Image (spheres, rainbow, N blue to C red):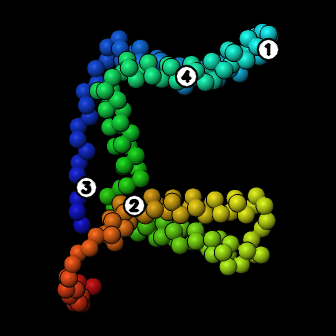
Amino acid sequence: MQEKAEMPTPPELKKDWCFYTGITMLFLSLVLPLFALLVPLLRLPTVLAALISGAFLVGGPEVLAILAVAFLGKNTFDYFIYIIKSGVLKILFPATVSKARYYTGLFLFLASSIPIYFYGYAPHVMPQGMARITILAASDLTFFASMFVMGGEFWEKMRRIFIWEGNQKVEPQTEQQA
């Protein structure tokens, strides 16, 4: 089994006035839509209230986010991407997972196909309306989640399925290898 390569060291984070201005603008771009909920409490004329709410919901956050990116710069962006990737990769793609976690993921992987077969071959068994859509959507989400539960070894197995390895001789296992 191949060892995973270590993540490179994080980029240097320079905390100057541009950094703090960019972080402030990024925070405001996330919080600004919440202020639209307060606009009706100001008892402004309807046109003015709609204009202000629209600016809080649509225009303002985007402009602030673009300005935040401009102030933060490429190094800060690279730093945040490094932090996100290293955290997500450790959680979703551990080098090895326990046997119980792998078999749980495999069970979810296989069980998620059951509602799809019922829908295709015995649709009268499935409930009607939104319940059917909810069951099929949950089945799809379970299928995708199962791949992450099984961990990095599963992804390596899936990758190897699509690689042609030529005419390799398969040697039978001996009792010592088994």
Q: Nearer the viewer, mark 4 or mark 1?
A: 1
In the picture, residue 167 is in which quadrant? bottom left
**Residue indicated by mark 4:** 61
C-alpha separation, residue under disc 4 versus residue under disc 2: 36 Å
Residue that appears at 40% across and 46% down: 88
Residue that appears at 69% across and 15% down: 51
Q: How many marks?
A: 4
Q: Is residue 45 above or below residue 96?
A: above
User: For the residue labelled by badge 1, is the local secondary structure a helix, a strand or a loop?
Assistant: helix
**Residue indicated by mark 1:** 46
Q: Earlier in the sequence, mark 4 or mark 3?
A: 3
Q: The residue under label 1 is which amino acid type?
A: Thr
Which of the image's four quarters has the N terminus?
Answer: bottom left
C-alpha separation, residue under disc 4 versus residue under disc 1: 22 Å
Q: Position of residue 117 (x, y in %)?
A: 63, 75
**Residue indicated by mark 3:** 4
Q: Earlier in the sequence, mark 3 or mark 1?
A: 3
| Crowd class of label 3 (few under 14; some 14 to 19; many from 20; radius 10 Å) | few
Q: Earlier in the sequence, mark 2 or mark 1?
A: 1
Residue that appears at 75% across and 61% down: 131
User: For the residue labelled by badge 2, is the local secondary structure a helix, a strand or a loop?
Assistant: loop
Q: The residue under label 4 is which amino acid type?
A: Pro
C-alpha separation, residue under disc 3 versus residue under disc 1: 59 Å
**Callouts 4 and 3 close, C-beta under 8 Å:** no
Residue that appears at 31% across and 27% down: 74
Q: Is residue 89 above or below residue 161?
A: above
